[in-house]
Image (spheres, helix red, strand yellow):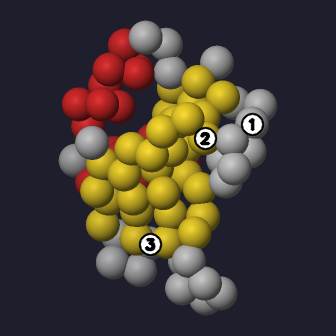
Amino acid sequence: MLKIRLSRVGRKHVAKYRVVLTEHRQSAKHGFIKVLGSYDPHTKTLVMDQAEADKYIATGAQYSETLAKIIAKNK
């Protein structure tokens, strides 16, 4: 099953996250299929290709719990 979830990038104490599409058993950091956007927790900004994400959601992918909460807050 495909999941759309967050993968941490950035240096220590300056976290940034990529929004990635990955198989649910794979590592989000190294086993991702495609990068769909980014999230900055310091400014709470989410930049994501929503059309691309909707395409994968329509074919059976799911958001992770954390990403689903972030998307709900940003709408």
Q: Is 24 rendered above or below residue 59?
A: below
Q: Residue furthest bottom?
A: 13
Query: What is the distance, in whole Å, between disc 2 and disc 3 at their CAs?
Result: 21 Å
Q: Say which amino acid is labelled 3.
A: Pro
In the image, 75: left or right of 39?
A: left
Looking at the picture, tell me which residue is in the foreground, 70 or 4: 4
Task: Identify the mark nearer the N-term, 2 or 1.
Answer: 1
Element under label 1?
loop
Graded by Cα atoms within 10 Å as few (under 14), some (14 to 19) or many (20 or more), the crowding at tag 2 reads many
Q: Is 59 rendered above or below residue 29?
A: above
Element under label 2?
strand
Q: Mark 2 highlights which residue?
A: 32
Graded by Cα atoms within 10 Å as few (under 14), some (14 to 19) or many (20 or more), the crowding at tag 3 reads few
Residue 61, horizontal then vertical, whole percent? 50, 21
Q: Say which amino acid is labelled 1.
A: Gln
Query: What is the distance, in whole Å, between disc 2 and disc 1 at their CAs?
Result: 7 Å
Q: Mark 1 highlights which residue?
A: 26
Residue 70 is at least partly visible in this image: yes
